[in-house]
Amino acid sequence: MGLYALELCQLGLSDKKCAWLGSVLETQPYLQLLSLRDNHIGHTGIRRLISPLARGCRKLSVLDLSGNMLQSQGVRILAQFLVTSGQGLETLDVSSNGVTAIGARDLANVLVPEFNLSLKHLNLNMNQLEGSGCEAMGRMLVQNQTLEVLTLSQNNMFDNGCQALFFGLESNTTLKSLDISGNFISHVGARSIQTYLQSSSTHTPTDNQPGLQSLNVSANSLGDEGIDVLCGGLSTNRHLIDLIANNVDVTDNGMQHVCKVLKAGAVNTPSLLTLSLRHNYRLTRNSYAQLAEASKANHNILRIAADLQFEGWDEVWTKVEMILIRNTVYAMERYRVPLLMVARGRILLRDITHSTSANSTGIYSLPIELRRMILIALDKHNVLTRTQHISALNIACNPANHFSTKQELLAAVLANDYAFVHEMIKTVHS
């Protein structure tokens, strides 16, 4: 037997020590997670580790090298490792390593289908990619078919890097989470985000359809104009469900645009589930009062994070909390009602006319349409559409409809809304 996980963090490991570490790794065939976070490993050290990793750690899926001194030369060595022996690696963290645009290009060049990699999570935050490095990431996203989470915070991206990144995203079908916080992005860069959201507005969050589900734009100089632009994309959005916009210098004017988007998130329409607006200290009581009112019309929003820096904030926030509780109930109902309608419908709608022992009195003496109305009344909060009601009743009427899991049944009833409801339930339980 051997190790499944090895964490050697903040131990001052240098390039010289990597020779010894390599001899250890070569004897660990079951190792799946290796964390060498916050040491002093440079390109020489990573070169000494790569060969032992390739020979001895065939099952490695998580590699954390954050907080070291790899720089672009070390990332180039990592890129070569990915091509030759890293096909099983799913998570790579090289944040805070002094990586420049050159290293970003080397990494981007191997994250294409021809090399058959499995990388799903890539963390490059707190490096020096700048605009040209983000352009390389954007070109990679056009072809990449595996990445699901990409973190590029604090990389001096600026507007040109943001534009290049989202241009590539328009052709991407797998990325679900993107962090571009702290990158000096203004309303100019926000326009590329708006264009992306509008171009993918016909999609819903499923495994087969493209579209970011989570976006972090915190600590950028968006201001009211940038928030207005961003909300222009959110108004037609059908896949982004988590927006983090902390510390973006928004004022009461910008909050009006946010509230307008929330009001548009009506019941049965995919829209934001979570919204974070923390550390926006120019917002006043009026903004949060508007937020509470806007949330009333929104049946989907489940979480709102904000800093309430005014007297009497508890009164305003109580209103928001009550709405979030209501929406949590609605979310659970969208999961529960289809199952309940089918289960009870199998009893109330069954055909007993050919049964010799059938009792024609009681519920079965009622017309079939009335029995259907009784089942539809189970949806007390009207969380399902008429089409979904009909689907549930038709499934209940047909004994030939068999489902091996609850999820299969829900997918049959909810159709295109299933993935969105699934995300709602995940958010509630998280």
Image (tube, rainbow, N blue to C red):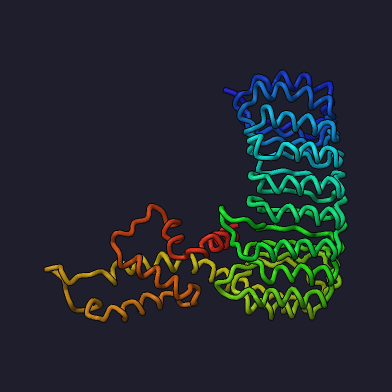
Viewport quadrant of the N terminus: top right
Observer-nearest residue: 241 or 377?
241
Which residue is drawn at the image coordinates 65% and 19% (left, top)? 27
Which residue is drawn at the image coordinates 68% and 53% (left, top)? 171
Picture layout, residue 34 above or below residue 55: below
Residue 245 appears in which quarter of the rendering? Answer: bottom right
Which residue is drawn at the image coordinates 76% and 19% (left, top)? 20
**Left or right: 406, with 294 as reference point:** left
Viewport quadrant of the C terminus: bottom right
Observer-nearest residue: 329 or 262?
262
Q: Position of residue 4 (x, y in %)?
A: 61, 30
Q: Position of residue 340 (x, y in %)?
A: 39, 67
Residue projecting furthest to the left: 356
Q: Position of residue 263 (x, y in %)?
A: 66, 77
Q: Position of residue 412 (x, y in %)?
A: 43, 61
Residue 2 appears in which quarter of the rendering? Answer: top right
Q: Total marks drawn?
A: 0
